[in-house]
Image: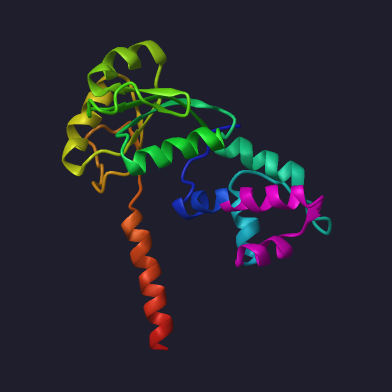
Amino acid sequence: MAKRENISSSVIRRLPRYYRFLRELDKQGITRISSNELAKRMRSTASQVRQDFNCFGEFGQQGIGYSVAELRDEIENILGIKCHYPAILVGAGNIGTAIANQVIFENRCFDLVGVFDKDENKIGSKIGEINIRHTDDIENFCNNNSVVTAILCVPKGAVEELSERLYNLGVRSFWNFSHYDLNMKFKNVIVENVHLSDSLMQLCFRINQEHNN
């Protein structure tokens, strides 16, 4: 698939939702779906669905709709779900352990190849089948395992130094749970900052709005 420029972040955020819905439809034995039907499930509009897909090519046929299996596979390719990029996780606390287990269980997009922490009491224990290593071993491990992505579950104050360390080892993408907006000075780095508290506050806002109406 050719690289496409200027795809909006809102379209990218919707792609995993399309993928989830299409997988469920496939499991239900539904073979075709129209943009109208898909829009209803997405709580969107048919024109929005078509515009989103047109960012990547022509997938449906007028009057016939979309093949569920083919569209699912196309979105899978767009998202790169079968690429299995080698990833490490740094910070094996409660959140880090939960995320590591989820990545292992899902086994999509990324292969978790290493877990690191500086707590001596955790070194040598396992998450799934992966031994927790000391953060002092990151350099040696990354040099030998072609790590592409780092999942950061460390305290806020540790992120800047750690990210620079990893950058110098060739890591160019970060999934960051550290409550620190990782705006690095390196232009060729991809960062996805995840703030769980932001999501909770959005939920709180919606509840508050509902109660005040």
Q: Is residue 121 above or below residue 98?
A: above
168 magenta-colored: no
18 magenta-colored: yes
Left or right placement of residue 56 versus residue 163 in this view: right
Q: Is residue 40 above or below residue 14?
A: below
Judging depth in this view, the residue of 92 and 12 nearest the camera is 92
Residue 152 x, y percent position in the rendering: 31, 36
**Residue 191 visible to an observer of this rendering:** no
Q: Residue at x 83, y 55 (%)?
A: 64
Q: Residue at x 81, y 53 (%)?
A: 30
Left or right placement of residue 105 versus residue 50 in this view: left
Residue 141 x, y percent position in the rendering: 33, 15
Residue 53 x, y percent position in the rendering: 63, 50
Q: Is residue 91 above or below residue 132?
A: below
Left or right placement of residue 142 versus residue 105 in this view: left
Q: Residue at x 56, y 48 (%)?
A: 16
Region rendered in magenta? 17-44
Count of marks overlaid on the render: 0
Q: Quadrant of residue 81?
A: top right
Q: Residue at x 32, y 44 (%)?
A: 177
Q: Quadrant of the N terminus?
A: top right
